[in-house]
Image (spheres, helix red, strand yellow):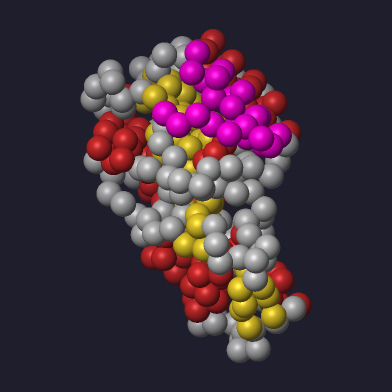
Amino acid sequence: MAISSFHTHVIGADRPIGRYLCRFLAEQNLIHRGVSIASTERPMLQSSARPVYVISPALNETTDFESAKFWIGRAQEEGALVVLLSTLHRYLGSKEAVKEQSPADNTSELSEAFAELEILVAENPQHIILRVGQLLTLDGSDFASRILSVIRSEPSLALDMQREFEPTPVDDVAIVVLAMLRQIHLAEDLWGTYHFSGVEPVSSYTFAEALLAEARQFEDLTAVELTTQEGGMTPEVWAPVADHTSLFHTFGIKNKAWRQGLARLVRAYYHDPSKETA
Protein backbone atom coordinates (compact mmCIF):
# COMPACT_ATOMS: atom_id res chain seq x y z
CA MET A 1 0.00 0.00 0.00
CA ALA A 2 1.63 3.25 -1.15
CA ILE A 3 1.41 6.51 0.77
CA SER A 4 -1.23 7.68 -1.74
CA SER A 5 -3.45 4.90 -0.33
CA PHE A 6 -3.30 6.56 3.08
CA HIS A 7 -5.21 9.62 4.19
CA THR A 8 -2.95 11.44 6.63
CA HIS A 9 -4.68 13.43 9.35
CA VAL A 10 -2.27 15.89 10.97
CA ILE A 11 -3.70 16.34 14.46
CA GLY A 12 -2.01 19.48 15.68
CA ALA A 13 -1.68 21.29 12.37
CA ASP A 14 -1.60 24.46 14.49
CA ARG A 15 1.54 23.25 16.30
CA PRO A 16 5.14 23.68 15.04
CA ILE A 17 5.76 20.15 13.71
CA GLY A 18 2.23 19.87 12.34
CA ARG A 19 2.53 23.10 10.38
CA TYR A 20 5.66 21.92 8.59
CA LEU A 21 4.27 18.44 7.98
CA CYS A 22 1.15 19.89 6.34
CA ARG A 23 3.33 22.10 4.16
CA PHE A 24 5.48 19.18 2.99
CA LEU A 25 2.48 16.92 2.34
CA ALA A 26 0.88 19.68 0.25
CA GLU A 27 4.10 20.32 -1.70
CA GLN A 28 4.17 16.65 -2.69
CA ASN A 29 0.45 16.52 -3.49
CA LEU A 30 -0.19 13.83 -0.88
CA ILE A 31 -3.65 13.26 0.56
CA HIS A 32 -3.89 14.89 3.96
CA ARG A 33 -6.01 17.00 6.24
CA GLY A 34 -4.77 19.22 9.03
CA VAL A 35 -6.88 19.97 12.10
CA SER A 36 -6.31 21.76 15.37
CA ILE A 37 -5.45 19.35 18.16
CA ALA A 38 -8.25 20.91 20.21
CA SER A 39 -10.81 20.09 17.51
CA THR A 40 -13.29 17.24 17.97
CA GLU A 41 -14.57 17.33 14.41
CA ARG A 42 -14.82 13.87 12.85
CA PRO A 43 -12.48 13.67 9.86
CA MET A 44 -13.86 13.20 6.37
CA LEU A 45 -12.26 10.10 4.90
CA GLN A 46 -11.86 8.86 1.37
CA SER A 47 -13.51 5.46 1.08
CA SER A 48 -10.42 3.97 -0.60
CA ALA A 49 -7.88 5.45 1.81
CA ARG A 50 -6.84 4.11 5.19
CA PRO A 51 -6.50 6.87 7.80
CA VAL A 52 -3.21 7.68 9.49
CA TYR A 53 -3.38 9.95 12.53
CA VAL A 54 -0.20 11.95 13.18
CA ILE A 55 -0.72 13.42 16.65
CA SER A 56 1.57 16.31 17.58
CA PRO A 57 0.92 17.88 21.00
CA ALA A 58 2.94 20.95 21.96
CA LEU A 59 5.27 20.73 24.94
CA ASN A 60 4.08 24.03 26.40
CA GLU A 61 0.30 23.56 26.01
CA THR A 62 -1.06 21.46 28.87
CA THR A 63 -4.52 21.21 27.31
CA ASP A 64 -2.99 19.37 24.35
CA PHE A 65 -2.62 16.19 26.38
CA GLU A 66 -6.32 15.72 27.00
CA SER A 67 -6.95 16.56 23.35
CA ALA A 68 -4.36 13.98 22.30
CA LYS A 69 -6.13 11.32 24.38
CA PHE A 70 -9.35 12.10 22.53
CA TRP A 71 -7.66 11.66 19.16
CA ILE A 72 -5.94 8.44 20.20
CA GLY A 73 -9.38 7.06 21.08
CA ARG A 74 -10.81 8.33 17.80
CA ALA A 75 -8.02 6.59 15.89
CA GLN A 76 -8.89 3.30 17.57
CA GLU A 77 -12.55 3.74 16.59
CA GLU A 78 -11.56 4.41 12.98
CA GLY A 79 -9.03 1.57 12.79
CA ALA A 80 -6.41 4.16 11.92
CA LEU A 81 -2.65 3.89 12.08
CA VAL A 82 -1.19 6.20 14.73
CA VAL A 83 2.03 8.22 14.78
CA LEU A 84 2.64 10.05 18.07
CA LEU A 85 5.21 12.83 18.31
CA SER A 86 6.61 12.37 21.81
CA THR A 87 9.70 13.82 23.46
CA LEU A 88 13.12 12.77 24.75
CA HIS A 89 12.28 14.90 27.79
CA ARG A 90 11.03 11.57 29.13
CA TYR A 91 14.73 10.95 29.92
CA LEU A 92 15.44 14.36 31.43
CA GLY A 93 17.66 12.89 34.16
CA SER A 94 19.88 10.91 31.79
CA LYS A 95 23.57 11.77 31.47
CA GLU A 96 24.24 9.25 28.66
CA ALA A 97 22.82 8.74 25.17
CA VAL A 98 19.45 7.07 25.65
CA LYS A 99 18.10 4.20 23.57
CA GLU A 100 14.49 3.28 22.90
CA GLN A 101 14.75 0.43 25.40
CA SER A 102 16.22 2.60 28.17
CA PRO A 103 13.93 3.01 31.20
CA ALA A 104 12.35 6.45 31.08
CA ASP A 105 12.91 8.93 33.87
CA ASN A 106 9.40 10.25 34.60
CA THR A 107 10.29 12.91 37.14
CA SER A 108 8.27 15.81 35.75
CA GLU A 109 4.60 16.37 35.01
CA LEU A 110 5.42 16.77 31.33
CA SER A 111 7.32 13.49 31.07
CA GLU A 112 4.54 11.69 32.94
CA ALA A 113 1.94 13.15 30.59
CA PHE A 114 3.82 11.87 27.55
CA ALA A 115 4.35 8.50 29.23
CA GLU A 116 0.57 8.18 29.56
CA LEU A 117 0.05 9.09 25.90
CA GLU A 118 2.65 6.53 24.81
CA ILE A 119 0.90 3.79 26.80
CA LEU A 120 -2.43 4.61 25.14
CA VAL A 121 -0.91 4.70 21.66
CA ALA A 122 0.89 1.38 22.22
CA GLU A 123 -2.51 -0.31 22.65
CA ASN A 124 -2.85 0.05 18.88
CA PRO A 125 -0.64 -2.68 17.34
CA GLN A 126 0.02 -0.47 14.30
CA HIS A 127 1.63 2.56 15.85
CA ILE A 128 4.83 4.59 15.75
CA ILE A 129 6.10 6.69 18.64
CA LEU A 130 8.78 9.19 17.64
CA ARG A 131 10.57 10.74 20.62
CA VAL A 132 12.06 14.04 19.49
CA GLY A 133 15.12 15.80 20.88
CA GLN A 134 15.57 19.44 21.94
CA LEU A 135 13.12 21.04 19.54
CA LEU A 136 14.32 24.11 17.64
CA THR A 137 11.42 26.19 16.32
CA LEU A 138 12.10 29.93 16.80
CA ASP A 139 8.35 30.29 17.32
CA GLY A 140 8.68 32.11 20.65
CA SER A 141 8.49 29.07 22.91
CA ASP A 142 11.84 27.30 22.46
CA PHE A 143 15.36 27.81 23.84
CA ALA A 144 16.56 29.77 20.80
CA SER A 145 13.65 32.21 21.17
CA ARG A 146 14.47 32.69 24.87
CA ILE A 147 18.10 33.48 24.06
CA LEU A 148 17.15 36.10 21.46
CA SER A 149 14.61 37.65 23.82
CA VAL A 150 17.12 37.96 26.67
CA ILE A 151 20.05 39.36 24.68
CA ARG A 152 17.89 42.12 23.22
CA SER A 153 17.32 43.53 26.71
CA GLU A 154 20.41 42.26 28.58
CA PRO A 155 23.46 42.10 26.29
CA SER A 156 25.43 39.91 28.74
CA LEU A 157 24.16 36.34 29.02
CA ALA A 158 25.64 33.52 31.11
CA LEU A 159 25.00 29.99 29.86
CA ASP A 160 25.76 26.48 31.05
CA MET A 161 28.80 24.75 29.51
CA GLN A 162 28.44 21.29 31.07
CA ARG A 163 25.33 19.39 30.01
CA GLU A 164 24.90 18.65 26.31
CA PHE A 165 21.80 18.30 24.15
CA GLU A 166 21.08 17.87 20.44
CA PRO A 167 19.18 20.78 18.84
CA THR A 168 16.48 19.38 16.58
CA PRO A 169 15.10 21.66 13.84
CA VAL A 170 11.34 21.41 13.59
CA ASP A 171 11.29 21.10 9.81
CA ASP A 172 13.71 18.16 9.98
CA VAL A 173 11.28 16.39 12.32
CA ALA A 174 8.49 16.85 9.78
CA ILE A 175 10.75 15.49 7.01
CA VAL A 176 11.48 12.40 9.12
CA VAL A 177 7.77 11.82 9.78
CA LEU A 178 7.05 12.08 6.06
CA ALA A 179 9.81 9.56 5.30
CA MET A 180 8.30 7.17 7.84
CA LEU A 181 4.84 7.56 6.34
CA ARG A 182 6.24 6.64 2.94
CA GLN A 183 7.60 3.35 4.28
CA ILE A 184 5.11 2.02 6.82
CA HIS A 185 3.39 -0.08 4.16
CA LEU A 186 6.60 -1.92 3.24
CA ALA A 187 6.84 -4.31 6.20
CA GLU A 188 5.00 -5.33 9.35
CA ASP A 189 8.02 -4.91 11.61
CA LEU A 190 8.37 -1.12 11.32
CA TRP A 191 5.95 -0.35 14.14
CA GLY A 192 7.33 0.70 17.50
CA THR A 193 9.29 3.49 19.19
CA TYR A 194 12.14 5.52 17.68
CA HIS A 195 14.37 8.42 18.70
CA PHE A 196 15.33 11.39 16.54
CA SER A 197 17.38 14.50 17.18
CA GLY A 198 19.89 16.66 15.36
CA VAL A 199 23.47 15.54 14.86
CA GLU A 200 26.22 16.92 17.15
CA PRO A 201 25.70 17.31 20.91
CA VAL A 202 26.44 20.80 22.22
CA SER A 203 26.28 22.77 25.44
CA SER A 204 23.88 25.66 25.92
CA TYR A 205 26.80 28.08 25.52
CA THR A 206 27.99 26.53 22.25
CA PHE A 207 24.46 26.53 20.87
CA ALA A 208 24.03 30.20 21.79
CA GLU A 209 27.28 31.02 19.98
CA ALA A 210 26.00 29.32 16.82
CA LEU A 211 22.63 31.07 17.10
CA LEU A 212 24.28 34.45 17.60
CA ALA A 213 26.53 33.95 14.57
CA GLU A 214 23.48 33.34 12.39
CA ALA A 215 21.34 36.11 13.91
CA ARG A 216 24.07 38.73 13.50
CA GLN A 217 23.65 38.48 9.74
CA PHE A 218 20.18 40.02 10.13
CA GLU A 219 20.28 42.06 13.35
CA ASP A 220 22.79 44.33 15.10
CA LEU A 221 23.90 42.25 18.08
CA THR A 222 27.48 43.55 18.33
CA ALA A 223 27.04 44.50 22.00
CA VAL A 224 26.08 40.98 23.06
CA GLU A 225 28.55 39.10 25.25
CA LEU A 226 28.10 35.40 26.00
CA THR A 227 29.77 33.91 29.07
CA THR A 228 29.87 30.51 30.75
CA GLN A 229 28.71 29.91 34.28
CA GLU A 230 27.82 26.89 36.35
CA GLY A 231 24.06 26.95 36.67
CA GLY A 232 23.77 29.31 33.69
CA MET A 233 20.87 29.33 31.26
CA THR A 234 19.77 25.99 29.82
CA PRO A 235 16.60 24.89 28.00
CA GLU A 236 13.57 24.96 30.29
CA VAL A 237 12.31 21.65 28.92
CA TRP A 238 15.40 19.47 28.82
CA ALA A 239 15.89 16.67 26.29
CA PRO A 240 19.12 14.64 26.55
CA VAL A 241 21.36 13.18 23.87
CA ALA A 242 19.93 10.06 22.21
CA ASP A 243 21.03 7.03 20.24
CA HIS A 244 19.40 7.23 16.78
CA THR A 245 20.64 3.87 15.47
CA SER A 246 17.25 2.17 15.40
CA LEU A 247 15.59 4.90 13.33
CA PHE A 248 18.37 5.12 10.77
CA HIS A 249 18.80 1.36 10.39
CA THR A 250 15.06 0.72 10.10
CA PHE A 251 14.03 3.57 7.79
CA GLY A 252 17.34 4.46 6.16
CA ILE A 253 16.96 8.10 7.14
CA LYS A 254 20.26 9.97 6.98
CA ASN A 255 21.62 11.97 9.89
CA LYS A 256 20.60 15.63 9.83
CA ALA A 257 23.03 18.31 10.98
CA TRP A 258 21.26 20.80 13.22
CA ARG A 259 23.59 23.67 12.25
CA GLN A 260 22.21 23.61 8.71
CA GLY A 261 18.69 23.60 10.10
CA LEU A 262 19.52 26.47 12.45
CA ALA A 263 20.69 28.61 9.53
CA ARG A 264 17.51 27.75 7.63
CA LEU A 265 15.18 28.58 10.52
CA VAL A 266 16.99 31.80 11.45
CA ARG A 267 16.72 32.98 7.86
CA ALA A 268 12.99 32.19 7.82
CA TYR A 269 12.56 33.89 11.21
CA TYR A 270 14.03 37.20 10.07
CA HIS A 271 12.17 37.12 6.78
CA ASP A 272 8.85 36.75 8.62
CA PRO A 273 7.29 40.25 8.80
CA SER A 274 5.41 39.36 11.99
CA LYS A 275 8.68 39.04 13.95
CA GLU A 276 9.88 42.02 15.99
CA THR A 277 13.66 42.41 16.08
CA ALA A 278 13.88 45.99 17.25
Q: Is residue 187 visible?
A: yes
Q: How many callouts does the rendering have? A: 0
Foreground residue among 249 and 203: 203
Name the residue furthest right.
Answer: 153
Question: What residue sits 54% from the left and 10% below the top?
Answer: 77
- Give residue 89's quadrant in the image: top right
The dominant secondary structure in magenta is: helix
Q: Is residue 106 above or below residue 238?
A: above
Q: Is residue 274 visible?
A: no
Question: What residue sits 47% from the left and 62% below the top?
Answer: 202
The image position of residue 245, as x and y in percent, is 31, 40
Asked if residue 142 lies in the magenta stretch, the reply is no
Give the side of residue 250 with respect to residue 77, left or right. left
Question: What residue sits 41% from the left and 65% below the top?
Answer: 259
Q: Is residue 35 above or below residue 66?
A: below
Q: Quadrant of the N terminus?
A: top left
The image position of residue 100, as x and y in percent, is 42, 32
Give the side of residue 108 with respect to residue 185, left or right. right
The stretch in magenta equals 101-123
- Give residue 223's quadrant in the image: bottom right
Foreground residue among 72 and 119: 119
Asked if residue 116 lies in the magenta stretch, the reply is yes
Foreground residue among 186 and 39: 186
Q: Is residue 67 above or below residue 25?
A: above
Q: Quadrant of the C terminus?
A: bottom right
The image position of residue 55, as x and y in percent, is 54, 31
Question: What residue sits 64% from the left and 83% below the top?
Answer: 224
